[in-house]
Image (tube, rainbow, N blue to C red):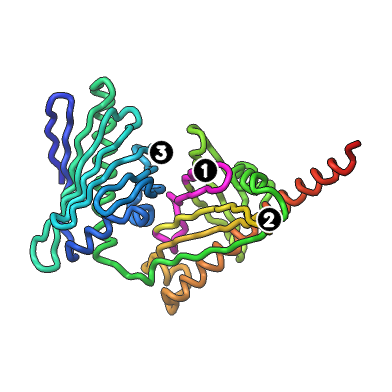
Amino acid sequence: MQETTPSGDVHRTEHQITLQAAPEDVFALVADVTRWPRIFPPTVYADYAERGADEERIRLWATANGEVKSWTSRRHLDRERLSVAFRQEVSQPPVAAMGGEWLIEPVSPGRTRVRLLHDFQAVGDDPEKVAWIHRAVDRNSDAELAALRSAAENDDPGLVHSFDDSVRVAGTAKDVYDFIYDAGRWAERLPHVARVELTEDTPNVQTLEMDTRTADGSVHTTKSVRICFPHDTIVYKQLQTPALMSAHTGRWRIEEDAGGVVVTSAHTVVIRPEAIPSVLGEDATVADARTFVRGALGRNSTATMNHAKAYAERNAAAAAASRAAAP
């Protein structure tokens, strides 16, 4: 549901939804941005730049009309009113300025209305840019509110599964990072990757489409957005997931310590329970799905880390040999 009221060059929208959940629980979902990538389809990655009791700065990467945009916003959390006001510090074109507010309103016991307000200005107040922003706000707001209702009404902790694997490397962190960053070469470097297409129109923001072979020989296609932080972290979110998962986010982390380099692959997935019978059989349970996903993702990410290890250690050995041969 939407109302739009232009006012000069400031354009305003309102979207709302009513859901079956306690308002305090809904507020908690809106307040914790670290959960947004697995809840909200447009959000790729979110973290805190600053965090206080009621005031905070958050960094967001999200899709808008098929493009990945990033910005930093200031937020004010009013726990008594159950509202979260936000304002972008520096917007990305075609947005010149944007802000708004989440308003969480009790309707009746166990029933809550969520209103999502936006106000924005387009660069130059260009009508085409205004229309582009309206489409993005409409699409993202509808997707976010629907996802918020699903998360609030179906809050089953057993469907969310987080895990990680690590490999120690006797090489440089930069070589490990470079191997993982250069995913466009994975089809030639990794046996479990059958096909890969990598695009990077914005530096360190990648779109990765990949066909991956599973243990039974079948191939599934995934599409991810990756945000790269040279030379220690790459975070990603799958926009196109295998049938068993409704969401999948991950992080590659490369850290140096006294013993050398440790690379860690972390995953958070949300199991899609309605898909379990068709994927794993009629008698399979959520626990079976968690075990299956843990094994499949862990095998592939560990294989990738072991190939990164071999690459970095070959480079380290070559560098050592070159130094030894120098006069």
Q: Quadrant of the C terminus?
A: top right
Look at mark 3 in the image and give the residue it sits on. 68
Classed neighbour count for the residue bearing mark 1: other residues with Cα under 10 Å, few (<14), some (14–19), many (≥20): some
Marked residue nearer the N-terminal end (1 or 2): 1
Q: Is residue 218 left or right of residue 151?
A: right
Report helix, strand or loop for mark 2.
Answer: strand
C-alpha gap between disc 3 and disc 1: 16 Å
Q: Where residue 233 sits: x, y (%)?
A: 53, 48
Q: Where residue 110 sits: x, y (%)?
A: 14, 67
Task: Please report the bounds of the magenta region as a residue range.
Answer: 225-246
Q: Is residue 312 above or below residue 133?
A: below
* Residue located 36% across and 68% down the image: 274
Classed neighbour count for the residue bearing mark 3: other residues with Cα under 10 Å, few (<14), some (14–19), many (≥20): some
Q: Are marks 3 and 2 in contact (CB under 8 Å)?
A: no
C-alpha gap between disc 1 and disc 2: 20 Å
Residue 26, numbered label: none
Marked residue nearer the N-terminal end (3 or 2): 3
Q: Kindly tell me whether residue 17 is visible in this rendering.
A: no
Look at mark 1 in the image and give the residue it sits on. 229
Q: Residue furthest bottom?
A: 283
Q: Kindly tell me whether residue 209 is visible in this rendering.
A: yes
* Residue located 29% across and 67% down the image: 155
Q: Are marks 3 and 1 in contact (CB under 8 Å)?
A: no
Of badges 3 and 1, the one in the foreground is 1
Residue 260, numbered label: 2
Report helix, strand or loop for mark 3.
Answer: strand
Q: Is residue 203 left or right of residue 187?
A: left
Q: Is residue 71 magenta?
A: no
Q: Where residue 74 sits: x, y (%)?
A: 28, 42
C-alpha gap between disc 3 and disc 2: 35 Å
